[in-house]
Structures are given as structure tokens and as C-alpha cells.
Image: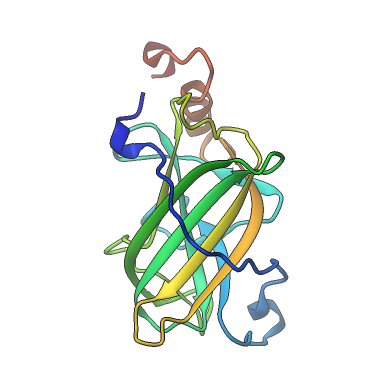
């Protein structure tokens, strides 16, 4: 059971969702206005990887224990500096709010996408941590299709903002065979720590 401080908390925000489309850097064109791309981290020491609409959201072992999803944004149209990131996960079928979180942190130029910014991995403040396993009855997200709405707002005076929306399913879909086996063990309904290690 996760401690109460790690459980979901409701965040009241106004979101203007933008449909996901092909990555603009693939065509060589820069988007107009603010564009937000949702991504995840295989490791907090590695570059951001972009999510796919309708794809999985890989769970990774966390320093605090268990398996979590680490979600962040790659953004065009907001300068580097401090940003506010708001994430909401809704059940893809019922629309029920399952998890919400708000983070504030530094972003800097993306090494993989010129003209974009993404979280500063030395500080990691702009990364949303989604607890998934061991299974928590209060936060059932494992293998559950979720509609992610991700909003980013600059903290500079202009406070430019943008958002994106897509469906993802948290799953044990990344890592070595051994890592995946431990993830699936921790995420099983009859989880027993003695069986997973």
C-alpha cells in the first residue's frame, strides 16, 4: 500500500486539449503557437521518449520502490525556465478522473528536437510521477486505458500555455526480460514481495 502522500489528489484546472498529430520535426516544419508532446522516461538519466496515442505507458522501477510511470512534456512555444505541468488521467471509457498531479520545475533546450524544451534532468521538477504497482485499490491504473490530458504553462510574465490529449495504457512493456518479470510480479493481483525477488 502506497503512503497517503503518494495517492491521487484532485487538481482543478481548465484544459484546452489539442489533438495529437505527426511530430513537426519529422517534416522539418516548426509549429505555430504552443505545441505540447507527451513523453515518458525509461530512466531519469536518459532522454525523454514520446508517447504514442493508443500505445502503452511503460512502468519503470522507482528509487522509492515499486513501479511508476514518469511522464513529462516536450514543448515548442515556451522558452526555457520554470514551467507548471498539470497531468490528468481519466478512464478512457467512463471519463472518471483516476489520477491528477501538478509539478513545477525547470525546462531547457531539448537535445533531440531543436526548438523545443523539456525537463532539466538535473532538477527533475517538471516530471509527473504516477504510482502504479504494487497494485493499489485506491489508484487502479495498471493495464487500464487512460486518457491523459497534459497541460504546460510558462512561469514567465506572458504565461504561454498549451496542452495535448491522448490515450495510454500503463503496462510492463519496457526493460530487460528480468525487469519486465519483476514489474509483472509486482503488478499481479496476488502480489507477494517474497515471490518477486
Establish if 173 lies above or below 19: above
Which is more toward the observer, 30 or 77?
77
Establish if 169 lies above or below 78: above
Which is more toward the observer, 61 or 99?
99
Which is more toward the observer, 182 or 119?
119
- Residue at the spot 51% in from the left edge and 65% down from the top edge: 151
Q: Quadrant of the C terminus?
A: top left
Figure label count: 0
- Say whether residue 148 is left or right of residue 40: right
Colour convention of the picture: rainbow
Q: Quadrant of the N terminus?
A: top left
**For residue 110, what is the image quadrant?**
bottom left
Establish if 147 lies above or below 72: above
Q: Is residue 133 visible?
A: yes
Q: Is residue 174 visible?
A: no
Image coordinates of residue 42 in percent, x first then y, are 47, 50
Image coordinates of residue 136 in percent, x first then y, are 45, 26
- Say whether residue 177 is left or right of residue 166: left
Which is more toward the observer, 164 or 76?
164
Establish if 62 lies above or below 189: below
- Residue at the spot 56% in from the left edge and 32% down from the top edge: 142
- Residue at the spot 51% in from the left edge and 70% down from the top edge: 74
Image coordinates of residue 196 in percent, x first then y, are 43, 18
Image coordinates of residue 161 in percent, x first then y, are 49, 76
Amino acid at each position: 500500500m502506497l503512503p497517503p502522500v503518494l495517492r491521487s489528489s484532485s487538481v482543478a484546472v481548465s484544459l484546452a486539449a489539442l489533438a495529437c498529430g505527426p511530430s513537426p520535426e519529422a517534416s522539418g516544419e516548426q509549429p505555430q503557437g504552443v505545441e505540447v508532446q507527451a513523453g515518458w522516461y525509461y530512466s531519469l538519466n536518459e532522454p525523454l521518449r514520446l508517447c504514442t496515442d493508443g500505445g502503452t505507458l511503460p512502468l519503470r522501477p522507482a528509487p522509492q520502490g515499486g513501479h511508476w510511470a514518469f511522464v513529462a512534456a516536450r514543448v515548442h512555444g515556451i522558452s526555457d525556465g520554470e514551467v507548471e505541468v498539470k497531468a490528468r488521467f481519466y478512464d478512457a471509457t467512463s471519463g472518471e478522473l483516476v489520477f491528477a498531479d501538478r509539478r513545477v520545475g525547470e525546462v531547457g533546450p531539448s537535445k533531440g528536437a531543436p526548438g523545443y524544451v523539456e525537463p532539466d534532468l538535473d532538477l527533475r521538477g517538471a516530471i509527473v510521477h504516477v504510482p502504479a504497482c504494487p497494485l493499489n485499490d485506491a489508484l487502479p491504473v495498471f493495464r487500464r486505458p487512460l486518457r491523459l490530458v497534459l497541460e504546460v504553462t510558462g512561469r514567465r510574465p506572458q504565461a504561454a500555455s498549451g496542452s495535448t490529449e491522448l490515450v495510454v495504457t500503463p503496462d510492463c512493456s519496457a526493460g530487460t526480460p528480468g525487469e519486465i518479470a519483476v514489474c509483472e510480479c509486482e503488478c499481479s493481483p496476488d502480489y507477494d514481495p517474497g515471490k518477486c525477488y
